[in-house]
Amino acid sequence: MLVAVTYSILWILAAFKFADRNWKPYYPTILYASLGNSLYELLCYNYPLWQMEPTGLSTP
């Protein structure tokens, strides 16, 4: 549990430090990926490609 939270925080900090500040040229690609994910979720919700495993963050 603590490892997942720690890794998440480290990834966020690295993104702020090393990220490309010129994100506007990539905005159409981000929208395209979001649309593709939304279509997958809409069309294949009964037939998932994989099953997510809990990371320990949820309480039983």
Image (cartoon, rainbow, N blue to C red):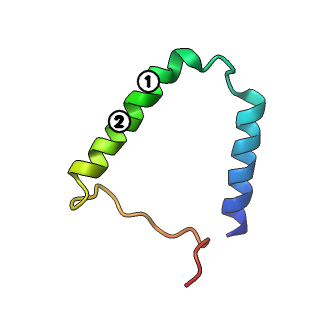
Give coordinates of residue 25: x percent, y percent: 53, 14
Mark 2, other Cα within 10 Å: few <14 / some 14–19 / many ≥20: few
Image quadrant in which the N terminus is located: bottom right
Give the side of residue 29 with respect to residue 43, left or right.
right
Question: Residue shown at 74%/37% (left/top)?
Answer: 14
Question: Residue shown at 56%/68% (left/top)?
Answer: 55
Question: Residue shown at 41%/37% (left/top)?
Answer: 34
Give coordinates of residue 11: x percent, y percent: 69, 44
Inspect the image, locate mark 1, and give the three-letter code of the amino acid beneath it.
Answer: Thr
Give coordinates of residue 28: x percent, y percent: 44, 21
Q: Sequence-wise, which precedes: disc 1 or disc 2?
A: 1
Residue where numbered disc 1 is placed: 29
Residue where numbered disc 2 is placed: 35
- Residue nearest the observer in this picture, 55 or 45: 45
Label 1 secondary element: helix
Which numbered circle lies on residue 57? none
Mark 1, other Cα within 10 Å: few <14 / some 14–19 / many ≥20: few
Inspect the image, locate mark 2, and give the three-letter code of the amino acid beneath it.
Answer: Leu
Image quadrant in which the C terminus is located: bottom right
Give the side of residue 35 with respect to residue 15, left or right.
left
Question: Where 60 sits versus 21, above or below?
Answer: below
Question: Where 12 sits versus 22, above or below?
Answer: below
Question: Residue shown at 74%/57% (left/top)?
Answer: 6
- Residue nearest the observer in this picture, 6 or 27: 27
Distance (Cα) linking label 1 and label 2:
10 Å
